[in-house]
Image (tube, rainbow, N blue to C red):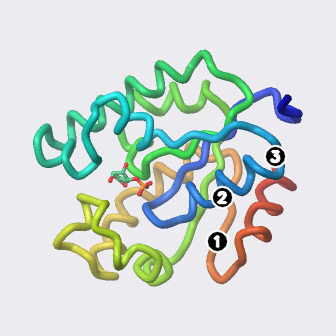
Amino acid sequence: QAKNLFPYNIMLIGFMGSGKSTIAKYLSHILEMEDLETDEFIVKREDMTINEIFQRKGEEYFRQCENNALRELETRQGIIISCGGGMPMKDENVELMKRNGKIVLLTASPQTIYDRVKYSNQRPLLNGNMNVEYIESLMEKRKDRYESIADIVVDTNDKPIHVIAEEVVSKL
Ligand code: S3P
């Protein structure tokens, strides 16, 4: 039986490669809370990979899937949700996310992000744009929104996973 130390959901947000999934798994282990990824949730619902959804249906459709996922998850409590990096960019998602739990923003420099994601071919927005400059420009467009909805911000540059996770827990 999960301990459920936190009577709310923990929503991890941040750029692709900021460590959301990794930290969610680690937190899930130490806090004994269930974790789930909105990307995985959508892949199951749509029965397509993220790349396929973007290719066949387009980004707007994917954003709507994220909105649907949030609505479905509204009834859940005491879970850790790792959100797709672009989720907060859709205005309709912001209120839902805020209602859904405590929002933890993980940050990292463009270079760190690049080093973490450079071999990934599962990030359609970076396919063909896999370089530090592009990452920096997309991050710039998202920064204000990320910061404005975050309850907690934790920098992840040059830190081992357990240190990042402990920092998150200490701020919850
Ligand atoms: C996206 C981030 C991805 C995934 C999709 C779009 C984004 O998730 O949802 O490729 O717009 O930043 P991760 O942040 O888990 O890589």
Specify the farthest residue to the top.
75
**Nearest to N terminus: mark 3 or mark 2:** 2
Write the residue at 56% across / 20% down.
74
Neighbor class of circle 3 (other Cα within 10 Å; few <14, some 14-19, many 20+) is few
Return the residue nearer the eye: 106 or 137: 106
Q: Position of residue 51 (x, y in %)?
A: 23, 52
Q: Amino acid at mark 3?
A: Leu
* Side of 12 relative to 83 (left or right): right
Query: Would you place residue 132 above or below residue 121 in this image?
Result: below
Mark 1 residue's CB less than 8 Å from ligand 1: no
Give me the C-alpha separation between circle 3 and circle 1: 16 Å
- Which secondary structure lies at badge 2? helix
Q: Label 2 amino acid?
A: Ile
> Viewed as shown, does residue 42 lie left or right of 26?
left
Question: Residue 120: where, in percent of width, then height?
Answer: 34, 70
Q: Quadrant of residue 128?
A: bottom left
In the image, what residue type sits under mark 1? Thr
Cβ atoms under marks 2 and 1 closer than 8 Å: yes
Would you place residue 69 above or below residue 171 in this image? Answer: above
Q: Which residue is mark 2?
A: 23
Mark 1 lies on residue = 156
Of the image marks 3 and 1, the number of the one nearer the N terminus: 1
Say few, some or many: other residues with alpha carbon within 10 Å of mark 2 (under 14 / 14 to 19 / 20 or more): many
Label 1, residues with CA under 10 Å away: few <14, some 14-19, many ≥20: many
